[in-house]
Structure formats: structure tokens, C-alpha cells
Image: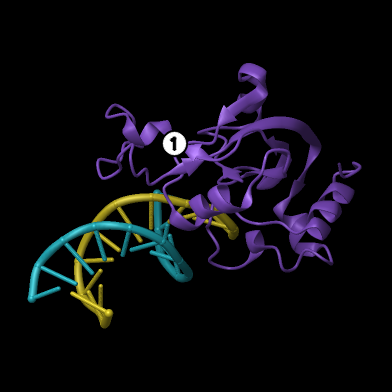
Chain colours: A purple, B cyan, C yellow
Amino acid sequence: MKSEPDEFSIDDLIKAENSTVHWDGIRNYQARNFMRDEMQPGDGVLFYHSRAKPLAVVGTMNVASEPYPDPTQFDPDSKYFDPKSTKENPRWMLVDVQFTARFDPPVTREQIKETAGLEDMMLIKKGSRLSIQPVTEQEWNIVHELAGRDPI
DNA sequence: GCCAACGTTGGC
DNA sequence: GCCAACGTTGGC
């Protein structure tokens, strides 16, 4: 899962209550589908800082809820308000995520590009801007190796 | 800050 | 249902 640290960083996640947040504001159907259809409580998630220095995987999270409707879509005061969405038929789903680890130092985009076994990661494919992307178990393990950590 | 690559919208 | 126009993303 990507986030611009100016908007929401891994430090913000750690500081949140229970180090857990609603991953709200996702307004892309493909990204929504990943949360709605592919994520289960306990799944591991890489936290990536986009539009940042350095561009890097800065840590990990756990999926901490079942998918449920993003409450911000119903809030007229939210910048994520969607007038076309109804409570009966919500458009946007999200999951909660909980902090699990910080990578220090982070695993940079440059490292990922250079590492054998990670060449197929969607993250480094040209033109790929999806903010939620699938990661294979092998990729998860290699990224943890680069971080000097045991994969969970 | 630029701009290429994407995704969405809406007129036809 | 096509596709031009528009808005957004995110690496550089």
C-alpha cells in the first residue's frame, strides 16, 4: 500500500491509536477491489512512501479488519465524499491496517529495481500508479531479506 | 515542478 | 459504447 508521507507517513501510523487506521480515501476501482476481494485479517502489507525521499518500503502492516464501506464517502465535509454513493449500495470499501514493523533503513525503490526476484513487482513497472498492489510471498520474503528481517 | 501515463467522465 | 477532454498520480 502506497502513501505520500506528506499526507500520511509510517510515523503517522505508529502514532495513531493502537497504531491502527482506516485506509480511507481510496477512489480507484482496482485498488478497491484488492481491499474488498483479496485482503483478509492478518495478511501482511508493505507500506511504501511515494513522492518522497527516499522512495522506499518503510515498513509493514497487518490487515486488521474485514473489508467494510469507507465512511468518508458518506461525509459531505470530507474531501473523499462521493455523492453518487449510498449506504444501501456503497461504492468504496476499505480495511483497517495495523503497524507491525519499521524498516530501518528502508528498502528503497533503487534496491528493489536492482534485486533479482523483484523484477516483476508491479511497483517498478513503468506507468504503474495503482496505490494498492498485490505482492507475492516470494517478493515479501526477498523484501524482508533486504530489510535484514525475518519474514513473519 | 514537470509531464507521461493512467483512469474517469460525459457528449454524441 | 466510443473516445476526446479532463483530472490525477507519482517518478524523475
In the picture, measured across the screen, residue A50 lies left or right of residue A30, that is right
Percent coordinates x, y for residue A27 in the rendering: 41, 47
Q: Is residue A79 shown to the viewer in this render?
A: no
Relative height, residue A113 to residue C7 (above, below): below
Q: Which chain contains the residue that carries disc 1?
A: A
Relative height, residue A77 to residue A94 (above, below): above
In the picture, measured across the screen, residue A107 lies left or right of residue A48, that is right
Residue that extends furthest to the front in the rendered view of this protein:
A88
Relative height, residue B10 to residue A43 (above, below): below
Q: Element under label 1?
A: loop
The picture quadrant where one finds residue A99 is: top right
Residue located 79% across and 58% down the image: A139
Percent coordinates x, y for residue C11 in the rendering: 59, 58
Q: Quadrant of the C terminus of chain A?
A: top right
| Image label count | 1
Residue located 57% across and 53% down the image: A37
The picture quadrant where one finds residue A75 is: top left
Q: Amino acid at mark 1?
A: Asp
Percent coordinates x, y for residue A77 in the rendering: 29, 26
Q: Residues within 10 Å of mark 1 (few under 14, many from 20)?
A: many
Please name the residue that numbered disc 1 is placed on.
A70
Percent coordinates x, y for residue A109 in the rendering: 70, 54
The picture quadrant where one finds residue A63 is: top right
Residue located 33% across and 36% down the image: A87
In the picture, measured across the screen, residue A31 lies left or right of residue A108, that is left
Residue located 37% across and 43% down the image: A90
